[in-house]
Amino acid sequence: MATGIRDKVVILGMGCTKFGERWDTGPEQLMVEAFEEALKDAGVERKQIQAAWFGSAMDEVNVGKSAVPLSMGVRLPEIPVTRVENFCATGTEAFRGACYAVAAGVYDITLALGCEKLKDTGYGGLPGTNTGATRTAQWLPATSAPGTFAQLASAYAAKYKVPMEDLKRAMAQVSVKSHANGSINPKAHLRKKVSIEEVMAAPLIAYPLGLFDCCGVSDGSACAIVTTPEIAKAMGKKDLVSVKSLQIAVSNGAEVGYNNWDGDHFVTTAKASKRAYEEAGVRNPREEISMMEVHDCFSITELVTMEDLYISDRGGAVKDILEGFYNADGKVPCQIDGGLKCFGHPIGASGLRMLYEMYLQLQGRAGQRQLPNPRHGLTHNLGGMPYQNVCSISIVGRYGD
Amino acid sequence: MIGITSFGGYIPRLRLSRKSVFQHIGWLNPATGAVSQGERSMCNWDEDSITMAVAAARDCLVGKDKGGVDGVYLASTTLPFSDRLGAGVVATALNLRDDIHTADITSSQRSGISALIAGLRAVKSGEGKNVLVAAAEKREARCGTNYEMLFGDGAASVLLGDEDVVAEFKGSYSVSHDFVDHYRGQNEQFDHTWEERWTRDEGYAKIAPQAIKGLMAKLGITMAEVDKLIFPCLFKREHAAIAKAVGATPDKVVDNLHEVCGETGSAHPLVMLVATLEAARPGERILVAGYGQGSEALYFQVTDRIQGLARRTGIHGSLANKEATDNYIKYLAFRSLIPTDLGGRAEVAHPTALSILWRDRKMILGLVGGKCQKCGTPQFPKADVCVNPECNAVYTQVDYEFAEEPAIVKTFTGDMLAASIDPPNIYGLIQFEAGGRFMADFTDCRLAEVKVGMPMRMTFRKHLDDKGRGFTGYFWKAAPRV
């Protein structure tokens, strides 16, 4: 009988570059920057890593296909390296691969590294999707990421009969809070506070999303080195940060093809979060989750995700957000490092970047951002579009807790 | 009895004010002020002769059994492909049978009327039982010419057969002359024209009456037995003069739609004919002629059956559904008459996989999805495994047509980032009232009017324009139900 991942794997060390418009830095250098920090943090040498998982999402720019770019970039000694890609859950997928290998007892120490170099396209926003000679190209609309996620807002407003102006205000508060958090994080891409008025007055990107409802497009890399609790203890490590849950849920086409989804939330997130709480032994997430890094690619994504994670009630996120429930000094601080919104969103690195903040917080190393005595940290990625996507949820905490 | 058994029309919703054209570029050729009254119809950026022909043909097939259609003639001088059958695209979009005769009739402003004659001959011979004729035109003219003002975009369609005839075909007469008042060479975008006075005096004034008088002589009738005389003519004064020359009083002469639409080229005789049929009473006698490298004329008599036809949008309905614009620059941009920037994101273009287009032609061109025989769920695209999570039955789906199914908006956005010549690009989740949904482009609407729950209908449009390879891809979009 399978027993899940809880407390079978611990994080030995982590690294994360500064995210941002790293015009003078190539992806190879970003990988080395994150990797060297993690090696030092873990206190291991390159040759002790037995297998690696590499996450990169965008073929259009970036390092290209296969695991070769990681192996060459950080000079791994011909060990097994696997490239994974699962939209915005790519970084978390790399972590999941590394953890499962350790949990299975196949390896002692493994590496997960994610990297994305998005600022080599020549225009703002994500690279145009490389649909190639597919059937999709012949019938689906020419969308953009903000355009697909923006539809959550039109559907949410209609379903809960929230005036768009009120919904926009709550969405604005999502961004205001993340800007405040990001402003005190030296590794964050955007480090400037903004006001609700500024957010609401910003130019329209995709109705009803304005500029400040959208996260940054950044270059960056993040990585984790994992092992078993026993090995970590034998190495003299204390305050072990342990993996409590790793869940993924993937759409099967029902949202966009069947008739019973209102377009206002994520079916996958609601399923993955339930499974994650069960795996981690969390009974009441609103009380037991101490902090979260969720996939705030757009303000409305974060807003509805609060409900799919069962932290806010259905239709209750607007009120919770406006009351500061998710602020740094609120009950469940969300995007304490600035989130995708301000820390940045190099796709393949994002899941690992979220874990990096949870790891620092649990070890009391988050500096100015440090929360008092956090217990369970939740990370969440949402790749694709609201109507067909990949959702990953991870929960980490102290070993044995 | 053979003749017209149904008819339909389509004029694009956008109407460009001719005054605005004159205000922008009248300085170049002040004489164009003489024809700058009213408005001309103008294709949306995602429309062309094929999409307009499909719209007119759908209108024509309202209430008819399209399974009985055994022939399609498409007439136009502005088909997007020189070597790919337009009528084949139309037939696939309409999801007609495969075992039918299809042909394009092109290369002359007379091709619409020629297609009508060809269709009637097919029915008369007994080879065709129900022949669909569609004519559509989207002509370009150089900026600042009077043709830019005179032309309009539009389409018309008639169904021909020997049952339930609404306008009986009595006979036709043709004259052919290689009279070149204008021509457009292969790969040329614009016409080359000869002096207007010669075109008028030696062309229209002499050749059009030959066909009209010839037909009357052939049938042994006089203008007293004609209630409506239809023939397009670019020149208003000449239109009246020709009518007079063939003995028609002004009340018999059907208006050429200059003020509200403009001349829709090879489609125009059919556009005027359909507009006339929409208001016709049983017994009415119609003489219609087309002009171009000669002239051809036909004579019809409306029957009682016309009163039993199902309601349709037609030319009058299309003309009533309009969005007026004075944005001449947008007209130029939509037709690629000025270079425009769609941003770096738009520059990635892959070849359209023709093998996929063939494999999934019913889905992509015909909007045919599937319906699960086990749980009854309509779904798009059709798949081997049912999308209903409670069902997931395998290999249970039969073809299900979505094109005529009413839908509503479930979610939507107006996207300024997605590449579009008409931002914001509006799209969203479309929910069909009888079940089934997909993410669709919206067209012919403004962001401010779109609401969750808004009633929509599907319309066949250009999906991609691969200018580098000269390929136009088509799919279906959602538009507000009028």
Image (tube, coloured by chain):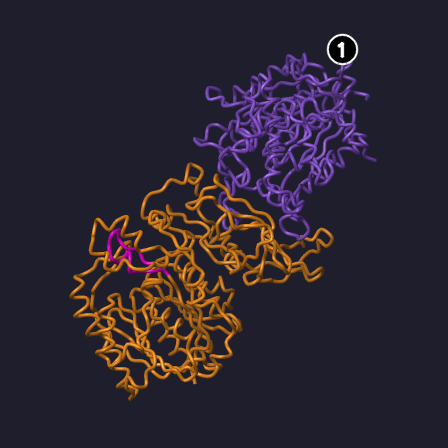
Residue B221: quadrant of the picture: bottom left
Check disc 1 and report the residue beneath it. Answer: A236
Task: Report the magenta residues as a range.
Answer: B139-153
Residue B146 colored in magenta in the image: yes
Q: Give the percent coordinates (x, y) of residue A16.
A: 60, 19
Q: In the visual, does A166 lie left or right of A314?
A: left
Q: In front here: A22 or A108? A: A22
What residue sits 51% from the left and 68% below the top? B97
Front residue (pair B55, A251):
B55
Query: In x, y percent, where is residue B190?
Result: 26, 55
The residue lying furthest to the top in this view is: A236
Rate crowding at label 1 as few (under 14), some (14 to 19) or many (20 or more) other CA atoms within 10 Å: few
Magenta residue check for B174: no
| Chain assigned orange | B
Residue B251 image point, x, y percent: 31, 77
Amino acid on which disc 1 is placed: Gly
